[in-house]
Image: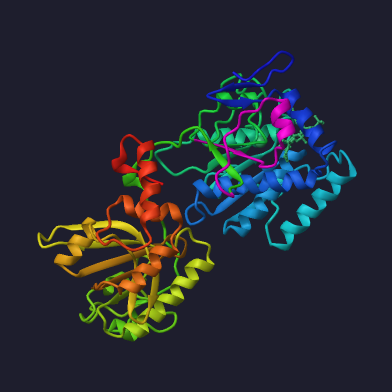
Amino acid sequence: MASRAGFSTQSSDSISYLLQKEAAEIDEILMGPLGFSVDQLMELAGLSVAAAIAEVYRPSEYSRVLAICGPGNNGGDGLVAARHLHHFGYTPFICYPKRTAKPLYTGLKCLQVADILQLESLGVPFIPVEDLPADLSNEFDIVVDAMFGFSFSGTPRPPFDELIQRLLSLENHDKTQKELPIIVSIDIPSGWHVEEGDTTGEGIKPDMLVSLTAPKLCAKKFCGPHHFLGGRFVPPSIVDKYKLQLPPYPGSSTCVRIGKAPKIDISALRENYISPEFHEEEVEADPFDQVQPPFSFCPCLSKPHAPLKGKKGKKLLPGPTCLLIWGNRMLLFTTEMFRKWFDNAVAAGLKEPNAMALSTSGKDGKPSSRMVLLKGVDKDGFVWYTNYESRKARELSENPCATLLFYWDGLNRQVRVEGSVQKVSGEESEQYFHSRPRGSQIGALASKQSSVIAGRDVLHQEYRELEAKFSHGSALQI
Ligand SMILES: NC(=O)C1=CN([C@@H]2O[C@H](COP(=O)(O)OP(=O)(O)OC[C@H]3O[C@@H](n4cnc5c(N)ncnc54)[C@H](OP(=O)(O)O)[C@@H]3O)[C@@H](O)[C@H]2O)[C@@H](O)CC1
Ligand SMILES: [K+]
């Protein structure tokens, strides 16, 4: 509980929840003394909604998004979110029944016009409410509920009463018959009391709620699987004044999950890969001939010299595109290809594109895999580092053959590298050791590298001090 006399901010599980009055006050402070403009806040809010959606529902499976936008700022958040979703690869549609209903102040009216213009320039269709299909279940994969936010009161008036009914009727469908659209509510599930929630028990039950700034009290009643917080702009003065306890945003993320992620049925996890088309008739019998721009290999070619059997036709080959590099044969050519793919992966902003699964096996033939980081690639091969007493090093000394696997999810690509392994020169190894951050150097010493290298005495001393701090010195991580 984070309340104090005079303030009614409440929290449960160390998150604060705001009353309607407090949400409105914060709104005024942000746009008054703190100097925010409404369009600035709405842009950040809408972006975080789009980011939360993209975190859970991939466009490859949930492409068609209907945003139902109300007359206030909640509706504005919906318009902004739809614009970002378009850029994220979704196909948004807008239903915006009261687009100029209430120009509260000139800024909002201008904003609505700007939002509409921007969406129209992207070719996002605006569907008049009378043209919206009565049954939304066939037409859309996601419905964004941006009808009402924290200024809602009473019972919904037309046409929103009927629109809310359409969302409700989705829940009454026979769920075994078809997959229903996901409902994502912005800030408040529309129709719910801002503080008391779904008082009748007959309101909408969204699958995702994206609270903005801080969750409102009704969010405590949200039972759906995905609760996120967005609106990463709350300054310390507001945090202090309202004693807000909010989860920290990870890295540069614009949204953060509140509460636990639901347990996933692993068997149900699947991804529809949308890769550039690659037809069977385009496949060469020898994969090396295939490695030409767009330098794509298919996993079915993992037996390199077996000529491809099967009908020539339009059949699309399944799975992500795969580049296979093996042996030393044509290494120069294939590592160049790898480099192009690697540069693409870096340019696409993928997390740790240099992370690769290294598989080895010793003389007992039992394979083992672990993730390591690629430290270099050139015409002589791929370079990574390990200490010589590790299991992988032992296995490689017994059987100097290994496979590397890079998986670049965002590009639907993987690269398999298969070949023999040899130690890099002592000089190269030494250079690498001294290029590492100090903490990693000490960590390497902790894992007992076999060769003693001049200049490590100081590090040994630092390591002993650290070891003394941790009573269970065996798994020291720095
Ligand atoms: N930190 C922040 O503050 C931020 C806030 N942001 C966003 O702003 C939202 C709050 O926006 P808001 O104040 O414009 O109110 P909102 O709820 O969208 O709609 C009010 C409209 O609904 C109408 N209406 C009300 N009751 C009704 C009923 N029963 N039936 C029918 N209509 C009804 C009402 O009409 P009126 O009753 O006044 O005639 C008015 O036109 C907030 O939830 C968040 O999403 C973010 O953008 C950025 C950061
Ligand atoms: K809403």
Camera-side residue of 189 and 418:
418
Task: Indicate the quadrant where residue 305 lies.
Answer: bottom left
Furthest residue toward right: 106
In this rendering, is residue 337 above or below 152? Answer: below
Q: Does the segment drawn in magenta span residue 425?
A: no
Q: Residue at x 55, y 44 (%)?
A: 250
Furthest residue toward top: 5
Residue 409, horizontal then vertical, whole percent: 43, 60
Q: Is 355 left, or right, of 151 in this rendering?
A: left
Task: Indicate the quadrant where residue 264 lies.
Answer: top left
Q: Residue at x 70, y 50 (%)?
A: 80
In this rendering, is residue 202 above or below 140? Answer: above
| Quadrant observed for ligand 1 in the rendered image | top right
Q: Is 84 left, or right, of 107 in this rendering?
A: left
Camera-side residue of 106 and 379:
379
Magenta residues span 226-252
Q: Is 302 left, or right, of 233 in this rendering?
A: left
Q: Residue at x 76, y 23 (%)?
A: 21
